[in-house]
Image: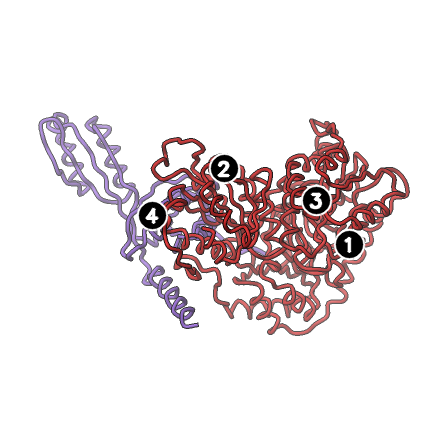
Chain colours: A red, B purple
Amino acid sequence: MMRALEHEGVDVLFGYPGGSIMPTYDALYDHKKTLNHILVRHEQGAVHAAQGYARVSGKVGCAIVTSGPGATNTVTGIADAMIDSTPMVVICGQVGVAMLGTDAFQEVDVVGVTSPISKWSYQIRRAEDVAWAVARAFYIAKSGRPGPVVLDFAKNAQTGMVDFEPAKVDFIRSYDPEPDLNMTDIERAAKLINNSVKPFVLVGQGVELGNAQEELRTFLEKADLPCGTTFLGLSAIPSDHRLNMGILGMHGNLGPNVMTNQCDLLIAVGMRFDDRVTGNLATYAKQAKIIHFDIDPAEFNKNVAVDLTVLGNCKQTLAAVTKLMSESKHTAWIDGFKPYNEKEYEKVIDKALHPKEGPLLMGEVIRKVSEAAHNEGIMVTDVGQNQLMACRYFKFTQPRSVVTSGGLGTMGFGLPAAIGATFGAPDRTVCLFVGDGGLQMTIQELGTIMEQGAPVKIILLNNNYLGNVRQWQEMFFAHRYSFTPMLNPNYELIAKGYGIPAKTVIERGDLDAAIAEMFATSGPYLLQCAIKEEDNVLPMTPPGANVDEMLLEV
Amino acid sequence: MEQEQDTSTKLYTFLIYSENVPGLLSQITAVFTRRQVNIESLNVCASSTPGAHKYTVTANCDERMARILTAQIEKRIEVLQAHYYTDDQLFINETALFKLSTPVMLKNPEVGRLIRFHNGSIIEVNNTYAVAEITGITNDILSLFGALKSMDCVLQFVRSGRICITKSRVEHLDEYLAVREAKRNASLKN
């Protein structure tokens, strides 16, 4: 197993040992120099760290855990990686084959549990199959639309003796991750774009997964196509690019959402029309023709019926369409976004970034952190208001800078994912925005940060509430704050217990200096910001409402 | 703008070909279950293509759902191909076995007449029971079952899942495998 992992180019593993994976850990002891094993404090931390590593590096993240509870603790991370298309291989120990099905100690049907939430799940029952299974696992995880793969590693296969012969898998008969370009579709797409007066492009994570940032830029600039991004697609194009009109969806920007229902051609690239992006499907972009670029044919016509599908890696499909497109200008159409942007700035953004009085707001903290990192940092978020606000106010100039749990919405994702990001991009600044709720879900990973000295800059946006649920209770449940107020511990003291420098900011006047101190301190740092307790994330498309019906105020 | 599609609920037949690996059946049925579609019948057996298994699944749904189910099934790594069909695109058969009470059959000659009328055959008779076999489409079998049941002579009844072959002159699986083989050879050359 160790040699097979080395053969796949693995250099970092996030894991936690236990009974059924002990033979593998014993072997790992002899491979410490090539396989940097990061001991997490809970198996959920291992998978989220592997996800963070994969997202920023573009490589396959790798987690290793024991059987039974070790394996079931990875389930959330596997489901998260599946819905967010993150390449990851999870190796779980398993009891020996002679014990399978006997309800043995720490035995669980891992393949049965993980099959529906993984790209591939396989039980290795013989030592002879290890090299092949690992090669196949990595090939499946990273090719096509990436995703998580689970290897359920029976103990007898771990202890069996066999000579290692490197295996290479780059072809599976039943799986075609690199579909050939369909030139008819490419030509049709170019024609639709050339004939469009009001085109609008939806940019998803597929662009970054396909390393097609340059191709996207050329595509947009050649025909002067305005775009909006999903949360996971945020860093596929710089925030300040003149054709980037902002964020799509429930808590996105007003302009892109309104114009979705005004364009004459909607061009979706590497995104899956999530309900948080579309709002009410019955009224979504009904006036427009829709083209969908994706590498996963199962995404076509799944949520939104489209007029043309273009199958393939967008690195190739975008380049091919761009070639056939004519240069054009859509100045008047693009100018049409401005009034909405100005309205949102006046009603929401200015107030979020430049409050004159009152407690600290999430928006101003996030923007100041982003700027202090020269807008070149990696943004890691937890889930909730911290996430929505970070996605709105952090700015991006570099690709692969977004690590957030988009599809599954996993609270507790942030802290371990940020640890993984520091290993995936050791030369970059990793800023984690986390709430007081989510931090406590995986707070034990402060121990991993302590042991590794992982340079995570933790910005704790503490509002003493489970803020996003509280906001919904305020807006849709008549202010009935059912179990969302939360009594918090002294986080500064907790961080210091782990040897992590920490500071709390309450006054606005102290914020700049505290952020400067955080970045001047090498290694990890926890900056707790006392945030306005009942701050709301706006604008907002209420659940089930039409995409262009955004509320600018409560 | 939306494409036209059939929004009525009807019985679709899904023909799925996969590699012969354990665990695939539960992956395929899970695709139906998750989308609240009930499987009406299921038949799994080796196909005419070496190494490939054939799943014949029927379920009631609308065409949009049939398309989504097919795409999600085909997405599983070891599934070679999945297609959905309506009855007019297929040659369909089912087999049923009836265990019938011999004393009742002797008393009521209508039982034997009904079986012959449905092109059924008696494959075993003794003092206690007779076994009849019939091959046909679902409605024929169910109508015979209903009639025999009303004569109070049915001791046991079993109906196989639907099996079918397509009326199309194109063999999708063979074409797919040929394309994949060509792609593999091309990549080996590179």
Disc 1 residue crowd, few under 14, some 14–19, many 20+, Cα 10 Å: some
Find disc 4 in the rendering and name its residue: B56
The residues bearing labels 4 and 1 have C-alpha atoms spaced at a distance of: 58 Å
Q: Amino acid at mark 1?
A: Ala
Tell which subunit mark 3 falls on: A
Q: Amino acid at mark 3?
A: Gln
Q: Chain of mark 1?
A: A
Q: Position of residue A393 (x, y in %)?
A: 76, 50
**Quick check: do tags 4 and 2 share a chain?**
no
Q: How many angstroms separate mark 3 from mark 1 (CA)? A: 18 Å
- Whether labels 4 and 1 belong to a single chain: the reply is no
Q: Could you tell me residue B47's position as x and y percent?
A: 28, 53
The tag earlier along the polypeptide, 3 or 1, is: 1
A462, above or below A487, in the image: below
10 Å neighbourhood of mark 3: few (<14), some, or many (≥20)? Answer: many
Q: Which residue is mark 1?
A: A373
Whether residue A173 appears in this view of the structure is yes
Secondary structure category for the residue under label 2: loop
The answer to whether the residue labelled 4 contacts the one labelled 2, judged by CB atoms less than 8 Å apart, is no
Quadrant of the rendered image containing residue A291? bottom right
Q: Earlier in the sequence, mark 1 or mark 2?
A: 2
Q: Which residue is mark 2?
A: A18
Q: Nearer the viewer, mark 1 or mark 2?
A: 2
Tag 2: residue type? Gly
Query: In the rendered structure, are the residues bearing label 2 and label 3 in contact, judged by CB atoms less than 8 Å apart?
Result: no
Residue A232 rendering spot, x and y as whole percentages: 64, 52
**Residue pointed to by mark 3:** A387
Q: Nearer the viewer's eye, disc 4 or disc 2?
A: 2
